C-alpha cells in the first residue's frame, strides 16, 4: 500500500468523525493518476461504497 493511500485512510477517519458526516454514504472519485489511487483506496477501505 502506498503512503498516499494510508494518508487517505486517515483523512477518511477524520471526515467520518465529524458530526455532519453521513457514514452510510461514502464515495470517492478520481481521474488519471487519482483514478488509480481511487481504485486502491476502494480496495483497502470497506467504508467506501
Image (cartoon, rainbow, N blue to C red):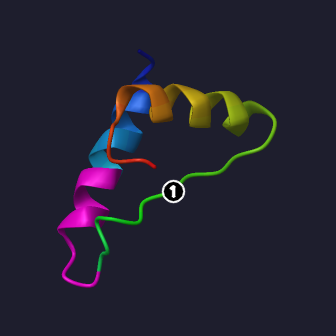
Q: Quadrant of residue 35?
A: top right
Q: Residue 19 location in percent, x, y? A: 19, 82
Q: Residue at x 42, y 60 (%)?
A: 26
Look at the image and say whether residue 25 sits in the magenta stretch: no
Asked if 11 appears above or below 40 in the picture, the reply is below
Name, please, the residue furthest toward the right: 32
Which residue is more in the foreground, 34 or 25? Answer: 25
Q: Quadrant of residue 43?
A: top left
Q: Is residue 27 left or right of residue 17?
A: right
Q: Residue 39 location in percent, x, y? A: 59, 30
Q: Is residue 37 left or right of residue 49?
A: right
Q: Residue 21 location in percent, x, y? A: 30, 76
Q: Which residue is mark 1?
A: 27
Look at the image and say whether residue 18 sits in the magenta stretch: yes
Asked if 14 appears above or below 22 in the picture, the reply is above
The residue segment tinted magenta is 12-20
Dominant secondary-structure state across the stretch colored magenta: helix
Q: Is residue 16 left or right of residue 36?
A: left
Q: Residue at x 24, y 53 (%)?
A: 13
Any part of residue 4 in sight: no
Q: Residue at x 34, y 52 (%)?
A: 11
Q: SS class of the residue under badge 1?
A: loop
Amino acid at each position: 500500500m502506498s503512503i498516499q493511500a494510508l494518508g487517505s485512510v486517515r483523512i477518511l477517519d477524520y471526515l467520518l468523525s465529524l458530526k455532519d458526516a453521513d457514514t452510510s454514504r461514502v464515495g470517492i472519485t478520481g481521474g488519471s493518476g487519482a483514478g488509480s489511487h481511487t481504485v486502491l483506496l476502494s480496495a483497502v477501505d470497506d467504508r467506501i461504497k
